[in-house]
Image: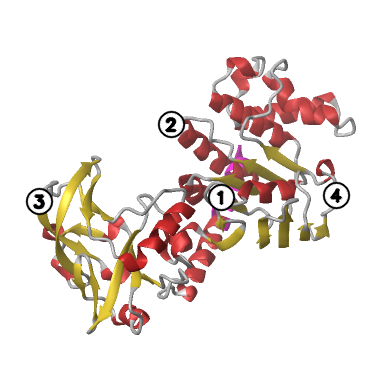
Amino acid sequence: MATIECKNLVKKYDDGFPAINDVSIDIADGEFIILVGPSGCGKSTLLRMIVGLEDITSGDLLIDGKRVNEVAPRDRNLSMVFQNYALYPHLTVYENIAFPLRLNKNKGDQKDLDARVRRAAEMLDLNEHLERKPGNLSGGQRQRVAMGRAIVRDADAFLFDEPLSNLDAKLRGQMRTQIAQLQRTLGTTSVYVTHDQTEAMTLGDRVAVLKRGVLQQIASPRELYEQPVNLFVAGFIGSPEMNFLPAHPRDGKLQTPLGDLEVPEGHYRAAEGKDIVLLGVRPEHFEDARLVEDAVRDKGTTFTADVTHTEWLGNEQYGYIRYQPDEQVKGKLDELAKDLDGDEMQPQVVVALDSTSRIRGGESADIWMDTRKLHVFDPETGENLTRDAEAGAKLTQEAAEERAAEIKRAKERADEH
């Protein structure tokens, strides 16, 4: 295992474009870091810089405290799992997993090689497939073979480049669980690139969000979700994504297309003095007003809106509310949509409703909003004016402590077997 330190890393191509622009990330020994962001944000480039497949224009890359900018990829002792598996079709599963050990003649004898291959195969449920060729395996099985090849090397760190993107949704879910369990058991430092935020939120100790080569925020998944630093992070993290509403602070209330909202004093102070702000509120912070308990009703505000349609998913449902866009911020929201790989920001609010709600499309309904969960953003800078940095740091610290305890338990269970 190893620490990995990225210090002010820059990658510029011949045209001068900075694919990675002054990125600094310290990865602790045994930590699972996710690099996430929309297409073209630089996440795969940064991973390739770490493994040595991309030159570093400026900055320093340290592995276990040693600068490795000019060290060849084969000498960095890092294992990479690629999107396309990179298996040898003429070799069996056994030989594909053993291949890195065959390359290193001094790594050990045949008995040691066999033991390591079979140990990796057992961890990945591949024992029954060791004599098969990759062409006869499913996508998920092939990806597990690729992971087995990384495991046997006893590398200092695992690097994953969108390893699940070629799999269907069901297989992705299964493999995501397997990768998470594997990393907890091995405790190997891991860096994982994905554009899938579900993978990012469920796998990572910390998640680094990139936009156009610039690091926006690195924190635990929960801190990113509850205390996003800016509009981009708030819009990227979460599914369905956060709703953004234009609001004008007036006479102690925030005037929005949904009506005048009474908000906590701190939220109003954050918006006060500005002509317009953007309110961010997640779908789950709404509810059918008829189903809200009296004990929490006064913790938010109720408004009446026309619901265009609903989607019932069994355990919950979503309602959609259209509103009149505000020209003052439409350009900013459309710019944000493009940054998030969209075309334009639809002037609508998505509200999560209890599955028992009888609200249906085409009718007017009373909707309750938990205003304690609102975020207030500056539409010019994108800054989250209501972010509580101290509370966010506490969430990340708690996540680190919980993860350390989880890894310890996983190792204890592995030792018992």
The alpha-carbon separation of the residues under discs 3 and 1 comes to 52 Å
Q: In which quarter of the image is the C terminus?
A: top right
Q: Which of 43 and 18 is in front in this view?
A: 18
Residue 101 in the image: state x and y as whole percent: 80, 30
In percent of the image, x 41 and y 70: which residue is there? 379
Q: In this view, does 409 lie above or below 141?
A: below
SS at mark 3 in the image = strand
The type of residue carrying mark 3 is: Glu
Residue 236 in the image: state x and y as whole percent: 45, 55
Q: Mark 4 points at which residue?
A: 71
Q: Residue 97 carries which label?
A: none
The type of residue carrying mark 4 is: Val
Between tags 3 and 4, which lies in front? 3
Between tags 3 and 2, which lies in front? 3
Badge 1 vs badge 4, beta-carbon distance below 8 Å: no
The alpha-carbon separation of the residues under discs 2 and 1 comes to 28 Å
Q: Mark 2 points at which residue?
A: 170
Residue 70 part of the magenta segment: no
Q: In this view, does 174 lie to the left or right of 2?
A: left
In percent of the image, x 42 and y 75: which residue is there? 385
Q: What stretch is highlighted in magenta?
A: 404-417
SS at mark 4 in the image = loop
The type of residue carrying mark 1 is: Arg
The alpha-carbon separation of the residues under discs 3 and 4 comes to 65 Å
**Between discs 1 and 4, the one toward the N terminus:** 4
